[in-house]
Amino acid sequence: MVIVEPCPLSLAGVTSRAAVPALIRSGDPLKTLGLLAHHQPPCSFMFYGQPPLENISLTEFEAFAVDRLKLLKSVETLGVRHVKTTEDYKKKLETESKNLNFPYRPPSQTDQRKPQIGLSEHEKRRKDHISHFILRLAYCQTEDLRRWFIQQEVDLFRYRFNELEAKQKLEFLHKNNLQYNTISAEEKMSLQEKLINSSYNVSGITVKDQDFYKVPFQDALDLVRTRKVYLKAGYVYIPHQDIVAIVINDFRTRLSKALALAARSLPAVHSDERLQPLLNHLSHAYVGQDYSVQKNVGKISLEQIDSLSVKSFPLCMRQLHQALRENHHLRHGGRMQYGLFLKGIGLSLEQALQFWRLEFIRGKVDADKFDKAYTYGIRHMFGKEGKRADYTPYSCMKVILSNLPSQGDHHGCPFRHSDPELLKQKLQVYKVSPSGISQILELVKGMHYQLACQKYFELTHNVEDANFSLNHPNQYFVESQKALGGGGGGGGGGGGKDIKREMGTPQRSRENSAVRGSTAAPEAAASASRDLAEIPEDLDSYFQDA
Amino acid sequence: MPSSDYDSACLPDLLPLYYRRLFPFSQYYRWLNYGGVQKNYFQNREFSFTLKDDIYVRYQSFSTQSELEKEMQKMNPYKIDIGAVYTHRPSQHNTVKSGSFQALEKELVFDIDMTDYDDVRSCCSAADICSKCWPLMTIAVRVLDRALREDFGFHHLLWVYSGRRGVHCWVCDEAARKLSVTARSAVAEYLSLVKGGDEMVKKVVLTDPLHPFITESLKVVEKYFPQYALQDQEILSRKESINKVLALVPEDILFARNELLRDFQNERHPEKRWELVNDQASRKQSTAKKGHYFEKEIMLQYCYPRLDVNVSKGVNHLLKSPFSVHPKTGRISVPMDLKELDSFDPSAVPTISLICEELDRPRTGEEELEDVKENEKDATERRKIRDYKRTSLAKYVKLFDRFVDGLASSWKGELLRKSDLEKEF
């Protein structure tokens, strides 16, 4: 693939070579990235074994990449809101794919006869193919980006593979040289009971009727992890219906290796001044705002944290704050999640050191031990130690999915990682109405943790319908400050309450809220002051809890 | 008790003696060199030392056994940690281009720490252990050892007492050392049944059908449960602990909780009380469409091994080395003999002060005789062997020796295959 300046181009790729001399010389950086190959778009999509080789304009380059990013972000959102095997999930993903002009289902015989609307199947595949490889470049740079990209691509792949007809699946396995050993009928009989007890939807009859594949456990990690397969002496026994698991495992491994390889060749790509800003822009888009840019450093004083934790912290952070005040200690996972959040709302490094130190030395840690054991970690968070990466506050997705809390931990998402009974009690203590609590618990039951948190926001801020989509604890904080009229993170601040909060930069919405503040409905203002009045009471109640 | 002799103030005086005369360097090197099958396997291994005043020195590496010996005798580390095998020598990690210095391999490791059981043991908390809670570690070793061998097919498992309040497992099979981060976390999650932090009361939830792994693990737990939980921990004897147990009975059979509370008033014997719980559970199973295994869930929540998944997951995660000293207790981190696991007593593990003292005792005639027999060996090497054999460390070094012998049989085959290949060319 050769990239040219934005100018009209035929897809066949007549390039103005003079415009891109650096890319065409031998030692072409894109070639070293594995982006070049000798074929037209592959006839079967999905494994992305061969990179595209054709000319493409910068405009198209960007448009394709942005569309795929949109697709992957929908994959992420849908994956949180729905169970991945439900019809709902499939249908919505199909719609998304259609809208963004991506292939969603390999054409069966009947489809091929139908007249095409919009892009042809071939063009869709070409787009799918090219856009995948562009995002590889944008998402190979850091561990975090790679993890996110792999996860979304794997989910997309799973969806597409599951949509294949049985015959197409076999064909796919055959084409990609994926062959697995089946076990004999005798072996099957001798293991029957164990196979039934370890695989879903397998009964005595189905054991007899279907093939079981015996593969090293490393090839089916997702099944091993969730204990959905029989494992003996290092081998898993996979019923044919679950074969998608091995294929996905393979896909994940290949992609992960390819990204590692791409990362090594990145300096070559970065030397191209047209590509670098584009790729950086793409990779920054994945979580929306990352809240690592500190706009409000120093605007919050340590004395405000107690009251802010009650007013404006999401439940996860309120829980961590409370645990910290009670135990004068938090374990590593909690320090990371809470520490980065505090950094995101505007604590400076000096404030953070003071904050943690004051609390820890009230417990078992003396000042000397604190300086030795914890200072480094806090400086690390602020990018002052180790590899000097400026760590970004955790998003909801990260809090929900990675580093699950275990004994002694208080981090994680309270909606995901609490007993419903405890959650209920906690919400009662926090004065959420019984009907509100049951709405929240209903959402939790449906695994809609972020929606549950958003509902909690609405109930505690007295807004009917929060018109943002919550995906970050720091976003919660910013929105809460806005709703309470305090601006995007600055402390105190008067003004009435703005019910119609604005999406967009905190700067602009602050201005808006100032204007709207005066016109806010009187009852909203009243409820805001009621919120404030409740603070001391709430603080009391959690000291009583201890 | 030997530990009463240990005073952490003496550690700086004892460590030089320990590293000069007692630390089993040759076995240690033989282990981590893995027969030299892979080039630079030992040389690219990270060691990390904790020195006096908690000074932490990472990225140490050594090219030979004697360099390792000299360096340890010079630095006298309070604690030794073992890290991963890297692409380059860790000691030179600053000289290679950033990004290309990567952790490649490490043993698959497990860390089980008694502090993670604080919500289910009544005798001690935090770093303290006693004979009433130690069975938790015994159960953990039994459950994990079985699963790692039978389910995952690993053979070379080194179980080590951490020196204070827990145990470590080093899975040394080649396949285990090569596992990716994803694979390690999958293994750790397969092995984890107790989930959730302090915000979760019920930490074990079983669903139908019971996976063979759970069935097998339950067999182990059931064996220890009556003595450990009912007798030693008395979980069904006092009111608060009874309430804690009954809180794990599922909500939809609240009446069962009340019935049990009523029945307990007439029945004081803990094992009989447990039978009552079992009765309720089986009644529930026969009426409900879906099996509720709450009695099993209770047993697992109280006894099932609690892993620190993060330790197992990372390839580059450091773990305290076998034969390192625990600076607080002075106990040596020694290998555990699974044949005598049930009688393993952490308080009987030798401390550094004990074994150093044993060195000073006058020698017996028998030992003199042995000296003559081993005359042909290199003089310093001979002295070192003679030294540790005179202390209570001997049986643990022997155990370690046997473990490395087992490992050696695996790399001998590999070396043979390699040399055959070379001959063909």
Image: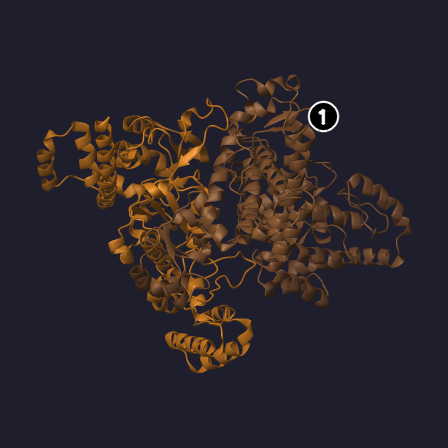
Chain colours: A brown, B orange
* Amino acid on which the number 1 mark rests in the picture: Cys
Q: Residues within 10 Å of mark 1 (few under 14, many from 20)?
A: few
Residue B110 sits above or below residue B255 on the image: above
- Give percent across and percent down for residue A308: 72, 49
Q: Nearer the viewer, residue B102 or A40?
A: A40
Is B215 situated left or right of A338 in this image?
A: left
Residue B134 sits above or below residue B287 on the image: above
For disc 1, the chain is A
Is disc 1 placed on a helix, strand or loop? loop
Reading the image, the residue beneath label 1 is: A7
Is B132 situated left or right of A172 in this image?
A: left
Is A12 situated left or right of B1 in this image?
A: right
Asked whether the viewer can see residue A227, the reply is no
Q: Nearer the viewer, residue A190 or A503?
A: A190
Q: Nearer the viewer, residue A388 or A119?
A: A119
Asked whether the viewer can see residue B204, the reply is yes
Residue sitting at 38 percent across and 44 percent down?
A: B108
- Give percent across and percent down for residue B37: 28, 33
